[in-house]
Amino acid sequence: MSYKIGEAARLAGCKVETVRYYEQMGLLPAPARSEGNFRLYSDSQVEQLSFIRHCRSLDMSLENIRELLQFREMPSKSCAGINQLIDEHIDCVESRMDALQQLRQQLRNLRNRCSGERSIESCKILHGLTGCPCHSTEAG
Amino acid sequence: MSYKIGEAARLAGCKVETVRYYEQMGLLPAPARSEGNFRLYSDSQVEQLSFIRHCRSLDMSLENIRELLQFREMPSKSCAGINQLIDEHIDCVESRMDALQQLRQQLRNLRNRCSGERSIESCKILHGLTGCPCHSTEAG
DNA sequence: AGAATCCCTATAGCCACTATAGAGTCAAGA
DNA sequence: TCTTGACTCTATAGTGGCTATAGGGATTCT
Ligand SMILES: [Zn+2]
Ligand SMILES: [Zn+2]
Ligand SMILES: [Zn+2]
Ligand SMILES: [Zn+2]
């Protein structure tokens, strides 16, 4: 069976442009072409596209996905590198979570400074964003 | 007092290029220029830059910051819009946190499928990323 | 035959910067 | 005075992961 790009995209749950983009980025091999120059994907190429999309749904970078695809081409070697890659990605997700938690706290503190019933010039939210030295080199 | 761009950037804790970028995006007014065509920032312009950087450290979009800067130019009006803007931003941060938590759980489940001591062809992490129908329209 | 729907390439846009190239300006030291 | 070096200027391109557009060609349905 072979699939045109639209069907491959539908099967993988992405847009046609995204499929062409992955080809351009070297994540998908250039597929066969029909007489009319349409891309024709094999089952295994569609599977590779789905693999990429699944990795993307886990928010892996295309660079990480490229590595995983390379692992797939050395099936008899150890999978330790795969586990390491996932571990690093989990670490990365967790640092983002930590950063967002800090951010939320800061925003809540700021929000609590005002009830929204003042004038702008006396709004303590704006005051909290104004003239604070926390980012200047003088204060650091 | 007036400051050249390098000093303004240092005071606000950002790069020189970033300052020029904000000017180009209309977040900072075009400053005065010296005889030699160097940008010269006033105290209040440096303060505006610090304001922008503080907002950015809270991960607000430049579009949101533009709105906040507009609020600052109507000091006698109600600050309700400011509070609303912050509330919406908090919502936005919280949805990102939720998404990341789900993501982490998915990654942990995947990670638990393998100890890293197999061959790549038998690695259940790769298997978990392969051939699963969760993103195809067929399965959806 | 005509219309709708697909497909092609090439290019530009998104966000918030960052980096580079190639030139000009200025202050301090020899 | 000359030179060195740090600073500044503009313009342009790159980052990531797409998305959108323009301007055409192919295929399919009626
Ligand atoms: Zn307020
Ligand atoms: Zn600050
Ligand atoms: Zn494994
Ligand atoms: Zn999937």
Image (tube, coloured by chain):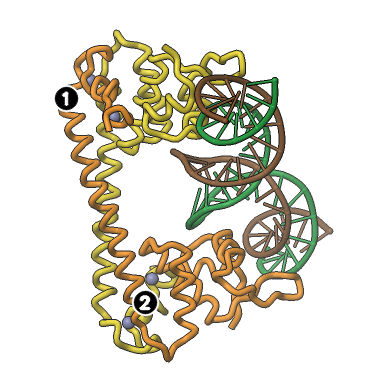
Chain colours: A orange, B yellow, C brown, D green
Looking at the rendered structure, the secondary structure element under dot 1 is: loop
Please give the name of the residue rendered at 25% of the width and 38% of the height, measured from the top-left corner. B90
* Amino acid on which the number 1 mark rests in the picture: Arg
The circle drawn on residue A113 is 1
Q: Disc 1 beta carbon < 8 A from ligand 1? A: yes
Q: Please, which residue is most extreme toward the top here?
A: B76
Disc count in the image? 2
Please report whichever mark, 1 or 2, sits nearer to the chain's N-terminal start: 2
Q: Nearer the viewer, residue A135 or A45?
A: A135
Left or right of B26 in this view: A56: left
Disc 2 Cβ-to-ligand 3 distance below 8 Å:
yes
Question: At which x and y percent is residue B130?
Answer: 41, 78
Q: What is the three-letter code of the residue carrying label 2?
A: Ile
Q: Quadrant of the C terminus of chain B?
A: bottom left
- Comparing labels 1 and 2, the label whose residue is closer to the camera: 2
| Residue A82 badge | 2
Q: Tell me which corner region of the image, top left, top right, bottom left or bottom right, holds residue B116.
A: bottom left
Where is residue A38 shown, x and y percent of the image?
69, 70
Local crowd size for mark 1, using a 10 Å CA cut-off: few (<14), some (14–19), many (≥20):
some
Task: Judge left or right: residue A127 versus residue A37.
Answer: left
Q: Nearer the viewer, residue A23 or B18?
A: B18
Q: Quadrant of the N terminus of chain B?
A: top left
Query: Between marks 1 and 2, how big is the CA–CA gap?
Result: 47 Å
